Image: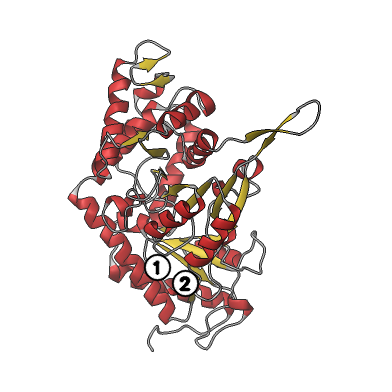
Amino acid sequence: MKDTQIKKLIETEKKRQKKVVNLIASENYVSKDVLEALGSELTNKYAEGYPGKRYYGGNEIVDKIESVCIERALKLFKLDPTEWHVNVQALSGSPANLAVYTALIPPKKIVLPGADNAEVLVPSKIMGMSLDHGGHLTHGHKVSATGKFWIQVPYGLDATTEMINYDLLRELAIKEKPAIIVAGFTAYPRRIDWAMMREIADAAEALLMVDMSHIAGLVAGGAYPAPFPYADIVTTTTHKTLRGPRSALIFVKRDARELDKKIDRAVFPGLQGGPHENQIAAVAVALKEASSLNFKKYADQVVKNATVLATELHARGWRLISGGTDSHLILIDTWNDGKKNEKGAGGVSGKDASDALEKSGIIVNKNAIPFDVRPPADPSGIRIGTAAETTRGRKEKDFKMIAKKIDETLRKVSGATAHTGKK
């Protein structure tokens, strides 16, 4: 690279990535093959439209590449192409979710009574997990475009179990009648009961959309239940547990409602122009990798590692939201009302915890916990995940050592004595 300034910064970032323990739940490490596709000459091609229906010439090859990506996405998740459609052009998860809402639940026109018969637009309702209980911005939060153009009906967690209370969720859905219910999360460590979410959506006469961005790789590897038998729409990013480039997929059930055609039109020309064909090729590479036996072993190991990490941290006195994890993700209450418990853990804000861990070479992110009393900029907890370090080959014994280092680091911040982890 002739640009020495950028080259040096890239090299510095590569070194940073190699020397830290990466526990960011939404990050992973792609293969050299994925990087090669992402940095290929496909970057040069403009391809507005869809395979066989482009607005530019010279798209014979990229048509084939995009078609391969579509075929691999459906095959990986064991979906019949006559029953399911997938759009592979969404640039990332947020625009993918925006495309779904734009396509399927646009504002409704109503006529005001009166002589002039004036028309007004009434926004539809999105029922999504509250951001501070583990949901995502694009599930209708007020600071997101999805909360500005639609009305969010937020659902949260049970105050005692810190898990979804499906009975209360059902009551809320029937009362509010949302147009779409979003099942998915960014900081919820437990399995979601997809069948129950389907029942609730049917009771409320709503579409069921699943955002499986965090767990897509676990679903592909058989380490987390698949949502497809129950959902109308499934969206996912491709760069978390699926271990691909930063992109997104939108799976849509084919039926008389023609949801698939509506979503395709919302992606292009509704929200995007020419797709990033280099990105699509890199996704295709990642999807092939995820179909291997080695990837299934990887997905299983991700969950095993998370279980060990959660168990070790709990044994050392740290309070885990919901008491543990069923996935790659763990949410830790480092603050615990500002008090140390009987094992001396607690009393560390999420920001202080994140900063201290980064200084010790462990990268996490500060995160709000359910019913958090602290501000989002300095919340009560941290979110950690095991996908990236599992990619690097770490196993249970390694995560026991990581738990020990996390505990020692946070205790130095709080002034507590190190705990052995033994009962």
Q: Which residue is mark 1?
A: 325
The residue that disc 2 covers is 322
Considering depth in this image, is 378 or 177 the residue closer to the camera?
177
Disc sitting over residue 311 in the figure: none
Question: Residue at the location (39% across, 61% down)?
Answer: 193
Q: Residue at x 32, y 66 (%)?
A: 305
Kindly tell me whether residue 359 is visible in this rendering: no
Quarter-wise, where is residue 223 in the image?
A: bottom left
Residue 98: x %, y % from top left: 53, 38
Residue 90, image x, y percentages: 45, 34
For the point 26% across and 46% down, which residue is it?
290
Is label 2 in a helix, a strand or a loop? Answer: helix
Q: Residue furthest right?
A: 115
In the rendered structure, which amino acid carries the disc numbered 1?
A: Thr
Q: Quadrant of the N terminus?
A: top left
Disc 1 packing (10 Å; few <14; some 14–19; many ≥20): many
Q: Is residue 245 left or right of residue 69?
A: right
> Is there a contact, CB below 8 Å, between mark 2 and mark 1?
yes
Please determine whether, in this image, residue 338 is positioned above or below residue 328. below
Quarter occupied by residue 58: top left
Q: Is residue 208 above or below residue 56?
A: below
The residue closer to the viewer here, 315 or 41, is: 315
Q: Where in the figure is residue 225, as x and y percent of width and height? A: 32, 57
For residue 217, say whether it is visible.
yes
